[in-house]
Image (cartoon, rainbow, N blue to C red):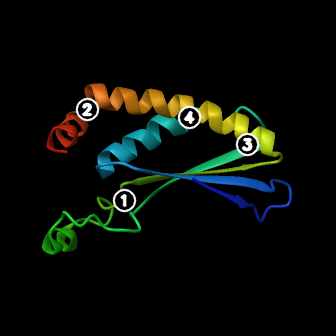
Amino acid sequence: MALTQSTNPEFPYSLTISLPLPTNRLASCALRALEVDDELSPFVRRSFTLETPSVEAPSEPQEKKQKQDPEESKTVLKITYIATTNRMLRVSVNGFMESLGVVLGVMAELDIDVLKVEMEG
């Protein structure tokens, strides 16, 4: 997580959360599940993006990385919050973390890819 000063004077407080997930499919699924709930407060805004990890996993062979679809390499869910006050930012992020916990819990219980990664790791 990174807390920074926003460049928007109306929303001076910001927080960026980068959540690495095992696959693009899981990251996309988490994004779709989380973005359906609108921010309740007009004093907080959030955005979602999928990104490629800044540090590549050393476990993958180089030829596999080169053949991989650029979209498939986007396995980091990035959530950016901006808010009018630090309190509004904290309250919104706390609510988001509860929702994130539910989504990740469901993935761990029901998704074959997650179970496979846990068994290998």
- Mark nearer the N terminus (4 vs 1): 1
Name the residue type under label 4: Met
- Mark nearer the N terminus (4 vs 2): 4
Label 3 crowd bin: few (<14), some (14–19), many (20+), radius 10 Å: many
- Mark nearer the N terminus (3 vs 2): 3
State the SS at label 1: loop
How far apart are labels 4 and 3 at the CA level?
12 Å
- Nearer mark to the viewer, of 4 and 1: 4
Image point (20%, 74%), residue name: 66
Please give the residue where the numbered disc 1 appears in the rendered image. Answer: 74
Name the residue type under label 1: Lys
How far apart are labels 1 and 2 at the CA level?
19 Å
- Nearer mark to the viewer, of 4 and 2: 4
Label 2 crowd bin: few (<14), some (14–19), many (20+), radius 10 Å: few
- Mark nearer the N terminus (4 vs 3): 3
Percent x, y for residue 30? 42, 40
Q: Is residue 22 above or below residue 104?
A: below
- Mark nearer the N terminus (1 vs 3): 1
Name the residue type under label 2: Asp
State the SS at label 2: loop
Image point (46%, 43%), residue name: 31
Please give the residue where the numbered disc 4 appears in the rendered image. Answer: 97
Quick check: 25 left or right of 119?
right
- Nearer mark to the viewer, of 3 and 2: 3
How far apart are labels 4 and 2 at the CA level?
20 Å
How far apart are labels 4 and 1 at the CA level?
21 Å
Percent x, y for residue 117? 21, 43
Please give the residue where the numbered disc 3 appears in the rendered image. Answer: 89
Q: Which mark is residue 37?
A: none
Q: Are marks 3 and 2 in contact (CB under 8 Å)?
A: no
Please give the residue where the numbered disc 2 appears in the rendered image. Answer: 111
Percent x, y for residue 110? 27, 26
